[in-house]
Amino acid sequence: MDTRDIRCFIRCYEEQSINKAAKQLFITPQGLSKIIKHLEDEFQVKLFERTHMGLEPTEGGRYFYHHCNELIFKLDELEINMKRLKDRKNKLKIGYSCGVLHVLPFRIIEEFRKQYGDFRITWQESLNAEIKEKVKRGEIDLAFVVGKIAEKDIIEQELFSTRLYAVVYEGHPLFDREVLSIKDLEGEKLITLNEKYQCHFSLIQRCNDFGFMPEIVVNTMDSQLIYKFCEEKVGIGIDVNIHQYSKKTKTLRFIVIEDSIPWKIYMICKAERQKEPIIREIMDRSYDMSMNI
């Protein structure tokens, strides 16, 4: 039995006609009848009664139909995972949450591409939650994400940690402060990265903890625009200070928000994969590199 036979049965059940189903499946009615007969012989149960009106499902046919979708899903998943196991021998997929590449130099992947010429190493950058989900599903072999994943079959190693900073322009009442609290942001016009970045959600969550919604006047996916709008005194910027922009300006101050949610980068992979040589080596080198950030 394969998924094609099951899909043929489903089409016959829903159309209640061999001829109509065969036309949709681009096969002959005779060929489709053989497939149904093969299923009936395999299960040793009649799936349809043939009547002058078409096909009438039997009790066994109705039972089989109600379990078909789950069965097809499991068979498809099995086929995908078997192919994945085969491909895994010479392919490696790496994921990055948005913003992480500002901290972890991409050159490490280029070095491995040269070292492991027989491996096809690919990478992608996407939303934090999406990258984590793809690791859980086995679609990505190794990933660098923001925040813990907290799954028992996933290992995670912290590489980097910082807090959110307020980017304050000269002349603002908060400009001379050494540290700030989330509460200090209440009523302030804020400039942040957009929903592709985890720090956006961390800011909103922490403001809610303090009983207010932040007034975000600019949402951008370009961190450099945060500083541009701050210099134009549109509002206070919120960012993690990983862009070295503070070295380029004297009109802005980067003030740590001491009670913000820490922005932490973790390296994650499935526990069953961590001892594979190339994954182990990338993890070790990434950890060593993080010690020098």
Image (spheres, rainbow, N blue to C red):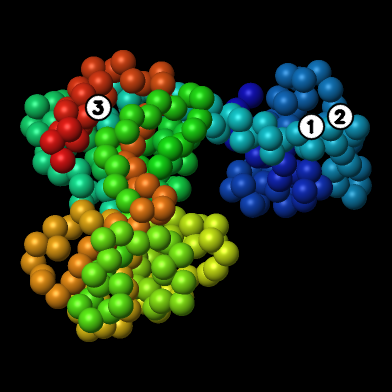
Quick check: 35 left or right of 203? right
Residue 96 in view: no
Element type at mark 2: helix
Work out whether residue 32 or residue 105 is closer to the camera in this orientation and state it.
105
The residue drawn where x is 55% and y is 33% is 76
Residue 250 screen position, x and y as percent: 10, 71
Q: Which residue is mark 2?
A: 60
The Cα–Cα distance between marks 3 and 2, rounded to whole angstroms, is 52 Å
Mark toward the viewer: 3 or 1: 3
Determine whether label 2 and label 1 are within 8 Å by CB. Answer: yes
Q: Quadrant of the N terminus?
A: top right
Residue 156 picture quarter: top left
Q: Which residue is mark 1?
A: 64
Determine whether label 3 and label 2 are within 8 Å by CB. Answer: no
Element type at mark 1: helix
Residue 288 screen position, x and y as percent: 16, 28
What residue type is disc 1 on? Phe
What residue type is disc 2 on? Gly
Q: Which residue is mark 3?
A: 283
Q: Name which of mark 3 and mark 1 comes first in the sequence.
A: 1
Work out whether residue 88 or residue 246 is closer to the camera in this orientation and state it.
246
Residue 110 in view: yes
The residue drawn where x is 72% and y is 41% is 10
Residue 36, compared with residue 173, is above or below; it is: above
Determine whether label 3 and label 1 are within 8 Å by CB. Answer: no
The residue drawn where x is 30% and y is 77% is 173
What residue type is disc 3 on? Met
